[in-house]
Image: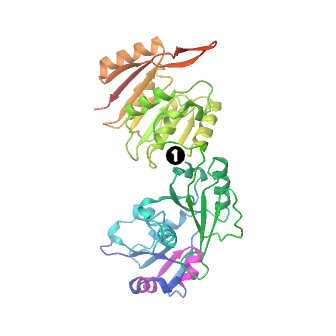
Amino acid sequence: MAPKSPWLTIIGIGEDGRAGLSPAALAALDHAAFVIGGTRHLELAAPLSGRSQSWPSPFAEAYALILARRGEPTCVLATGDPFHYGVGAELARLVPAEEITCFPQPSAFSLAAARLGWSLPECDCVSLHGRGLERIIPHLQPGARIIALSWDCSTPGKLAELLKARGFGASTITVCEAMGGPRERIRRASAADFGIGEIDPLNTVTIEVAATRDARIVTMAPGLPDALFENDGQLTKAEIRALTLAALAPKAGELLWDIGLGAGSVGIEWCLRHPRNRCIGIEERPQRADRARRNAQELGVTSLDIRVGRAPDALTDLPPPDAVFIGGGASETGVFDAAWAALKPGGRLVVNGVTLETETLLGSLFAQHGGSMRRLAVSRLEPVGGMHGWRAAMPVTQWAVVKP
């Protein structure tokens, strides 16, 4: 039977150690029979009256140790605010909220904003700790203010190189080290002339983004230029892609299946619509899968999960999607049936076809399931000798339907 009262205390601790803890947090820490946290956390919280242990490796083993002490006074030490990119959220998935007491400290984001005099709600807050550096790319917008948690001492320099390579060399980088304690240090430099060395591993980076005219900016609009996607011709073109995204109607935190991933343009743009959006892309050709991975990296998308395989077999055991896009292989036996069966109620399914055979199939599916159909035709102006003329692309038949 679950305890009625809190037994697990999560304490955010800063670089000022015990001196920065409230009386209530100190009482909970001193009352705990078991204390677990990083080696640095344990040193900052010393002396400890209960048994202490550093985080094990792999980190996930710590959860079993904590759950084994359910009902006993147990304390977890974390950096700053445990529920802002911290361990708190993961523990709350395992332990009911009514069994947890949390004493947060100011997060690194709050401390950095305070040091620079920035309004925190107007900043983009990003974690690069244990995550790909490319996550920063969609946030590189002219005039933006970014606060990023570093992975280690090399993160600021790597960010400077990335900014220079993408045309943001005039941006100002501020490195905030060991904030809130006696070792605190704040240093700044331009990305183009970044020369800050001997950086403390415990650092947070801020960026005041300044873009040149030729900076590679990932704009906010759907239908990004085709030139941004490396491809072998298997690409949903910008105009059709924008209409396809509109039909898929992405909402925050949703999962898309992109079947017939190709260059990955639809799945990538789905993920760009919101930071919590995810996509599983199915592509049977390894070379195309690798190309899609490069495109995702170039555009700062880290939530595209690419599976090499052929639908419908590759769809087995995947988490159910909120939306499905079939950009290739719609006429293959069983592809629609498998996708439709997995799609959540209220989910959207969109199929684009360019062949007569696929169009015939879509007409049959429309008659059976309803939805909407439209034919999309685009012409682009191209040189014709010394003059210009309209060159029509192959028309696309699009079927969109919502699952009851």
- Determine whether 353 is above or below 167 in the image: above
Q: Is residue 6 left or right of residue 53?
A: left
Quadrant containing the N terminus is bottom left
Numbered-mark total:
1
Q: Is residue 28 magenta?
A: yes
Magenta residues span: 25-45
Say what amino acid the circle numbered 1 marks.
Ser
Q: Position of residue 152 (x, y in %)?
A: 64, 64
Q: Main secondary structure of the magenta part?
A: helix
- Determine whether 106 is above or below 303 in the image: below
Q: Nearer the viewer, residue 176 or 398?
A: 176
Q: Is residue 5 left or right of residue 102?
A: left
Looking at the image, what colour scheme do you see? rainbow
Query: Going 47% across and 27% down the picture, which residue do you hit?
Result: 239
Q: Is residue 67 left or right of residue 211?
A: left
Can residue 167 be seen here? The reply is: yes
Query: Going 63% across and 13% down the picture, which residue do you hit?
Result: 386
Q: Nearer the viewer, residue 111 or 32?
A: 111
Q: Position of residue 380 (x, y in %)?
A: 52, 20
Mark 1 residue crowding within 10 angstroms, few (<14) / some (14–19) / many (20+): many
- For mark 1, what is the residue? 303
